[in-house]
Each structure stands twice: as C-alpha cells, then as structure tokens.
Image: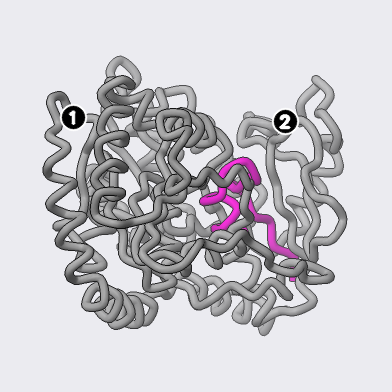
C-alpha cells in the first residue's frame, strides 16, 4: 500500500500532530505501507529518523488541461516534478489533512488551488479523502459563480469529506448539494494516543522541563490574537490575567505551541522580568513533548486550536482564548463552553477571564473527569481512520 498525505507541515505543531496521528493510525493497520509526507517547503524537513518519506508537492504543481495533466516547466526546489508525479500516480490513496484551506477567508486564488489538487486526483483516478478540517465561508465576490460551479463539481469526487465544524458541514451540503460530507470531530481529538514507534525508526526519549511544585498554570498565547485584535489591548489582557493568577497563588509558565508564538511569550516575560514566579520556556516542543508538558499543569490558558486539543486529549482543562467558529464548537463538543473568550473583541473586559479562572480553579477536578468521559464518547465517533482503512482493505481485496 502507498499513501500520499497532503496538507501537513512541520512549522505548525497542529499540522505536525495531524500528520503524526494519521501516520500512526495507518501504521497500526499497515506496518509496511509506504507513506509520503507531501509538502511545499523549499527544502526537505526530515532528519532521517522517520518511518515515512517526504516529497515536494504544491496543490498547483500540476494542472488539468484538455490534454490531461500538465507538468510544470519551472524547476521544483528539491524533488523533481517527474518524481512527485510518479509517487502520486502509484499511490493507492490521497489523504488531505489541511486543517483549513478552502474558504473565502483565504481568497479566491487559494481556494481555486485547493480545488486544483482534487481535480488532479480525479484526472489520475486516485481516490482521495479529505480528513477533518474547516470549510468556508464561501463569499467569493466577483468569482462566486465560477468557484461555486467548481466546488459543486470537484468536491463530488472525494470518497468522503469530513467537516470539522457544523457551519462548514451545512454549507457544503446546503449550498453545494454534496452528499459525501460527514460531520466529524478533529482527527487528533478523535484518535487514541499516537505511538512514537509508528513515526520514528528509533523513538526519541521524551524529555521536557519540569514545573516547580503544584499550583502551576500554563499560558500559551497565539500570535494571531495580537495580529487580529488590538495588540496593545491583547497584551494588557494577558498582563492583567497573569497578575490575577499570581495573586491567586499560582506559578505561571509561558510556552509556545507554534514557532511564531515565542514573540508574545517573550513580551509577557519581559513584563515580569524580575518575578521568578513567571517562567518562560523557549523550547520548540514536538507534539509528543507537548503532551508531556500539558500534563504537568492544573489547567491551561491557551489560544492555539490544537494546543487545546492536545490538552483535552490529556484530560487537562483549559481557558480558551479564540475567536473562530472552530474554538466555540470545540468547547461545546467537550462540554466546556463557559471557558471560551474572544479577547480580540473591542473593549473586551478581562474580568470575564478572572471569573472563569476562579471557576476553573474551584472545579478543575470535576472538569478533568468530565473531559475524560467526554473524550471517550468523542473517540467512539472517530470514524475517519476506519473509513480510510476500510477503503484500503477493499482495494486490497480487489487486486
């Protein structure tokens, strides 16, 4: 079996986690499967200790014309178009784990390129499954009619489309009449523990810094919160929140979930430069290390979607600082809607977070039990892996 995985990268821990989770699920059923991590980085990113291969791929690398597939004339950075095309053609299944790539938020060109990849798969008669991800909104302005027609036509081809949020699910079904769309929780949340032995040739030792004693809270800001809202207001909210945590007798640990989040972590530590109760970890944790980090805290205050997912998967409660639909639906799914806040909103009152922190502190053991019970229920609904494996086994029998 040969699997071609698109939509992942190593720069974002959420994308890395989705990649590792998907590979582990495949390896557990097909230990000898050849798996390609197909990405568009200008240079290779693997260091040799992984159980899968990488190959250069962008969604617009190939195009469908009247004559068939067009190969690019411009050189590709490190893997030739011919090599990529050969790997693609010989694959039994394409799995796309983009997270969020199709919608007017990214502009019409970005969405057209996303559809192009599905059209190439259709032209080559390669089955494709779109694993749980966000879709929409679909407000394309002057390109509306053209993209509506392409979405309606192209997205009938995937074997399954797993929509992570109800908004996207409804839009694909109601606006485009798609019958192959399934509402499905995030693939990392819906999976069992990912096994490092499925990812690495030699699994690395998980080693993370330790917190000092009990009563420790982790704070992991999202740089996008500063970009999206008023950056000074956002910084002030974090500052006041950390002061409140310290006054409540907590030690605070600042760390990042994505590479760029080191900036707000550093800004916040500088505001508490002389306070040893506020610690900055500069580590660029892997998703496996992040699991180990999460488990040390009473609760987290966090702004990255998959940072929250990893915490929930380890039964660690969170105060969520997010603005998008995916954050709200995630909190509702895990019975935690009282703990989500959009700190990018104008005139946001930080006292709302103070109240949530107090409630979390009083009820964290209850919330841990609630998360454990709810996680078991959610994982029973995690059918995307089973569907992919069922398809592969069906194809295997037909050979």
Say above or below: 129 vs 229: below
Q: Residue at x 16, y 54 (%)?
A: 356
Q: Is residue 288 magenta?
A: no
The residue nearer to you, when weighing 291 against 271, is: 271
In the figure, residue 66 lies in which quadrant? top right
- Give the percent coordinates (x, y) of residue 185: 35, 64
* Numbered disc in front, either 2 or 1: 1
Of the 4 image quadrants, the one containing the N terminus is bottom right
In the figure, residue 217 lies in which quadrant? bottom left
Q: Residue at x 55, y 35 (%)?
A: 116
Residue wearing tag 1: 345
- Give the percent coordinates (x, y) of residue 42: 76, 30
The residue nearer to you, when weighing 150 against 111, is: 111
How far is disc 2 from disc 1 in space, using C-alphas? 46 Å
Say above or below: 147 vs 335: above
Q: Residue at x 76, y 72 (%)?
A: 33
- Give the percent coordinates (x, y) of residue 386: 50, 78
Regarding residue 398, the answer to whether it shows in the image is: no
Residue wearing tag 2: 70
What segment is highlighted magenta in the picture?
Answer: 1-19
């Amino acid at each position: 079996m040969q699997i071609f995985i698109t939509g992942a990268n190593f720069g974002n821990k959420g994308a890395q986690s989705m990649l590792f989770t998907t590979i582990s699920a495949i390896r557990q059923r097909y230990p000898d499967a050849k798996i390609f991590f197909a990405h568009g980085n200008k240079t290779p990113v693997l260091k040799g200790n992984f159980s899968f291969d990488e190959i250069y791929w962008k969604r617009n690398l190939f195009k469908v014309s009247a004559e068939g597939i067009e190969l690019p004339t411009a050189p590709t950075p490190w893997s030739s178009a011919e090599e990529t095309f050969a790997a693609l053609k010989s694959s039994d299944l394409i799995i796309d784990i983009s997270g969020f790539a199709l919608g007017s938020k990214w502009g019409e060109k970005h969405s057209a390129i996303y559809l192009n990849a599905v059209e190439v798969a259709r032209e080559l008669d390669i089955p494709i499954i779109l694993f749980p991800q966000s879709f929409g909104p679909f407000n394309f302005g002057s390109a509306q009619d053209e993209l509506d027609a392409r979405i309606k036509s192209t997205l009938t081809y995937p074997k399954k489309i797993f929509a992570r949020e109800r908004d996207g699910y409804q839009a694909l079904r109601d606006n485009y009449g798609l019958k192959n769309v399934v509402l499905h929780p995030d693939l990392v949340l819906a999976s069992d523990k990912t096994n490092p032995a499925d990812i690495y040739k030699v699994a690395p030792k998980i080693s993370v810094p330790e917190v000092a004693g009990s009563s420790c809270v982790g704070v992991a800001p999202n740089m996008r919160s500063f970009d999206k809202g008023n950056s000074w207001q956002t910084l002030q909210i974090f500052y006041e929140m950390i002061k409140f945590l310290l006054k409540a007798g907590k030690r605070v640990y600042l760390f990042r979930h994505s590479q760029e989040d080191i900036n707000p972590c550093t800004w916040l530590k500088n505001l508490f430069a002389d306070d040893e109760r506020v610690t900055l970890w500069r580590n660029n944790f892997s998703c496996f290390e992040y699991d180990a980090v999460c488990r040390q805290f009473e609760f987290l205050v966090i702004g990255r979607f998959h940072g929250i997912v990893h915490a929930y998967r380890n039964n660690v409660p969170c105060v969520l600082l997010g603005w998008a639909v995916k954050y709200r639906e995630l909190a509702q799914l895990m019975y935690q809607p009282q703990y989500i806040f959009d700190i990018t909103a104008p005139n946001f009152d930080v006292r709302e977070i103070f109240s949530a922190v107090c409630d979390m502190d009083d009820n964290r053991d209850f919330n841990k039990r609630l998360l454990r019970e709810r996680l078991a229920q959610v994982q029973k609904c995690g059918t995307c892996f089973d569907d992919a494996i069922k398809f592969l086994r069906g194809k295997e029998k037909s050979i």
